[in-house]
Amino acid sequence: MEETTDILIVGAGISGLATALALHRLGIRSLVLESSDTLRAAGIAFTTWTNAWRALDALGIADSLRQQHGQLFGIYTSSTVTGNLTSHVSFTNKGTYGDHEVRCVKRKALLEALAKELPNDTIRYSSKLVSIEDLGFLKLVHLADGSTLKTKVLLGCDGVTSVVAKWLGFKQPSLTGRSAIRGCAYYHKGHDFEPNFQQFVGNGVRYGIVPCDDNAVYWFFTWSPSPQENRQLLEADQQKLKQFVLSKLGKVPKQIRAVIEDTNVQEIVRSPLGYRPPLEILFGNISKDNVCVLGDACHPMTPDLGQGGCSALEDGVILARCLGDAFFVSNQHSGFENDDEYTYERIKIGLNNYAKTRRWRGFELISTGYWLGWIQEFDLFGMRFLRDNFLSVFLSGLFLKKADVDPKELKL
Ligand SMILES: Cc1cc2nc3c(=O)[nH]c(=O)nc-3n(C[C@H](O)[C@H](O)[C@H](O)COP(=O)(O)OP(=O)(O)OC[C@H]3O[C@@H](n4cnc5c(N)ncnc54)[C@H](O)[C@@H]3O)c2cc1C
């Protein structure tokens, strides 16, 4: 007989595991399908802003991650052209909803912390969703190995190439023409960096150096490759990527250059930068019937605000809260004769409420990130002068502003 689940989550990335854990905290079981044979921690580390920590508190795993990742106290932005500091924004200033909290978290540590709290058989590895079929109040999903599963709710947390987003009518994310190279240097005897985010902007590039803990320093580099650079780097190995980044750093202190020099080439990855055009988020189907999308499957964005993963954590908490109502309300006075139909209608309402809440948030983050990236990497027609002399504090302040989500919205 075919297996039937209440809630099927596709993808064991940040959004999928956060959703499974949030549901688990509410006493609701789910099954997570992951195409890889293990947790995939692509991208090494990432900056987690205040909203992520509020979501992690709700999920009950913030404290263990706090012990592994040091708090950051400010962002210093410098010009790669002059070498001068253009702004400093302190993370110790209070936001509208309380203290800010910023840390650079290792992806593997986050995924493992989420997975560890789930019941043993929640994640099913080497299980790749390939297609979805309507089956009355259920969805039938087909996996790459030929097996099928029925589910009352289907949640697409399957990242930028989401099969679920395609089923909902979304197009593939648009490419920006920009690219990112990321890496991490490890210092077994400790490093000398202060607990701050250091950012460098100018000459068409933006890069940053962020300590994760006493031993690891994460870095990223974004730019718009010229056609010639694209040709050169198309087949480039990690050693060439490293040399390329070093050649583009501009005026920068030796200590910063050393982080890239000290990075083991195996720790270097390159990613093209894509996003969902914001109007698609406003007018597209984030949910339809008993199906919806979260995280990058819903709102892929450029990394300029550092909010893709943070907002994926928000998604998980908010979705679980919206869906919780569907599973805990009894059919007694509903007027529905059929329990399945009643549950289906409640699920639809829950997912629809989630979609309503997340539509504007996705729109706001994608658009702000897109323009922020453009302003920081565009150097012509006086933009550099404007940016370095007048906009720098405002632009860095956006990181905190967009992360200052009301903790009440992120409660389970
Ligand atoms: C250069 C760069 C820097 C970034 N920096 C930051 C940052 O500083 N802060 C921040 O918050 N965010 C950052 N992000 C964004 C962040 O990485 C993503 O938003 C986040 O990883 C999205 O998580 P997700 O779970 O939605 O998707 P993913 O991490 O892509 O996870 C999707 C999972 O689904 C699985 N999967 C895919 N298809 C299927 C299928 N058909 N069947 C089964 N499983 C499937 C995949 O194997 C994967 O495990 C950055 C992104 C980039 C590219």
Image: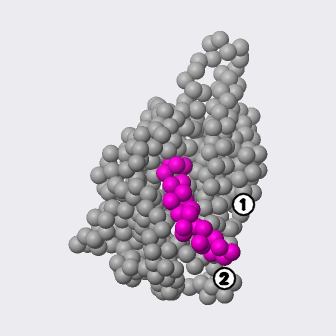
Seen from the viewer's position, the closer of residues 87 and 287 is: 87
Q: Which residue is mark 2?
A: 226
Give the label on residue 75, or none.
none
- On the image, the x and y values in percent for residue 216 come to 34, 68
- On the image, the x and y values in percent for residue 246 come to 47, 84
Q: Secondary structure at mark 1?
A: loop
Seen from the viewer's position, the closer of residues 7 and 227 is: 227
Q: Which residues are magenta?
A: 378-403
Report how many numbered discs are placed on residues in the image.
2
Q: Amino acid at mark 1?
A: Gln
Q: Which residue is mark 1?
A: 172
- On the image, the x and y values in percent for residue 327 come to 57, 27
Label 1 CA crowd tier, 10 Å (few <14, some 14–19, many 20+): some
Look at the image and tell me whether residue 23 can be seen.
no
Label 2 CA crowd tier, 10 Å (few <14, some 14–19, many 20+): few
Q: What residue is shown at x 29% (from left), y 52% (from top)?
A: 67
- CA gap, disc 2 to disc 1? 23 Å
Q: Amino acid at mark 2?
A: Ser
Residue 396: in magenta span: yes
Q: Give above or below for 358 relative to 243.
A: above
Sequence order check: which comes first, mark 2 or mark 1? Answer: 1
Q: Residue 210: name its quadrant.
A: bottom left
Instruction: Tell me the mark number nearer the camera, choosing from 2 and 1.
Output: 2
Q: What residue is shown at x 59% (from left), y 72% (from top)?
A: 385
